[in-house]
Image: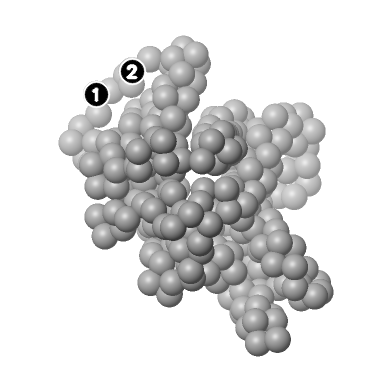
Amino acid sequence: MAGINNNRLPAGSHVISSRATSVGLLAIALWSLMAGTVRIVAEAFGATLGSALIYTVGSVLLLIFRRPAPLKEFPKRYLIIGGALFVFYESSISLSLGLASTAASSVEVSLVNYLWPTMMVLLTAIVSRRRHGLLKVLPGAIVATCGVMLAVGGNSGLDWGAAAQHIISNPLPYALAFMGASAWSVYAVFTPALSRGVDGTSLFFPCVAVALWIIHFASGQGMPVVAPNVVDWLFVLIAAVSIGGGYACWGHGILRGSMETLAVASYATPVLSTAASTVLLGLSLSLPFWVGVALVVTGSMLNYIAQRKQSRR
């Protein structure tokens, strides 16, 4: 986070930087640690308290290493629309996972959340206004999305019939996850134009922490029964760096880097997250995971090739 302290660009400009794109790609690597570390923290502190602690520590780190620009420099529309989308996404994902009634439901909710890379690719193609842009990326998006479902769901033995029953019996977490995924794709694609080059990640992050503390106290959950140890607190720090650092890098990337490249690369997020989680949680990767990885790579390459062909025209 320390290497990207410049939060401002000249108003209205968006000069694509390969370095900024690389910083944005670093976010995907950092986010790969998120699911596994959050699960470990939740087991030690509880779901709501653990999330609140992670975002509080992350907020402090962002304010230290990547202080936001003065409030007067933020466009009001960006503060209102961008801030609302950011806080809504984070809160909705936290709530959706908390409301999932079983471990299987948690996997299914995660799959719904992981629709955001596909939504982002499709939105990016639409706003690019290139001829047949949406049709060009649609095949790759479908292939990559199937790969994500297989990599994340197949490794956990996802039962699609049971998933349908879970949605019917408890639709709220799935609806929240879908709305959250939609909100994040809209945030990533549209807020760079609203921001006028000013990154609000370090400003929005504490708002998420406040929302999560409100959710924690409203839920009635208290302190953990067994006192957390030093290792548990270390994972709070690791999760905070993973999430806070990831959002800082992502915010820098979408403002100054190639939105199309980041959109295509975002398909790697759920795959890397699943792989990292299996290592952290001591699980094994099955054949469906690797088939899913192959599909994600294939779909991403199809989108990359389509993007390159269109950029040459």
Say which mark, if any, is on residue 223.
Answer: 2
Residue 40, quarter of the rendered image: top left
Q: Which residue is drawn at 18% across and 36% down?
A: 230
* Rendered view: 96 above or below 134: above
Q: Which residue is drawn at 38% across and 15% down?
A: 222
Q: What residue type is labelled 2?
A: Met
Q: How far apart are marks 2 and 1 (CA)?
A: 8 Å
Q: Which amino acid does label 1 sit on?
A: Ala
Q: In this view, does 298 lie to the left or right of 282?
A: right
Q: Nearer the viewer, residue 280 or 47?
A: 47
Look at the image and tell me in which quarter the C terminus lies: bottom right
* Rendered view: 52 above or below 203: above
Q: Is residue 69 left or right of residue 185?
A: left
Residue 4, quarter of the rendered image: bottom left
Q: Nearer the viewer, residue 231 or 28?
A: 28
Q: Mark 1 points at which residue?
A: 227
Q: Where is residue 101 in the image (x, y as percent from the top left)?
A: 61, 30
Colour mode of the rendering:
one colour
* Rendered view: 301 above or below 214: below
Q: Where is residue 14 in the image (x, y as percent from the top left)?
A: 51, 64
Q: Which of 95 and 228 is in front in this view?
A: 95
Q: Which residue is drawn at 46% across and 63% down?
A: 256
Look at the image and tell me in which quarter the N terminus lies: bottom left
- Asked whether the beta carbons under mark 2 and mark 1 sit within 8 Å of each other, the answer is no
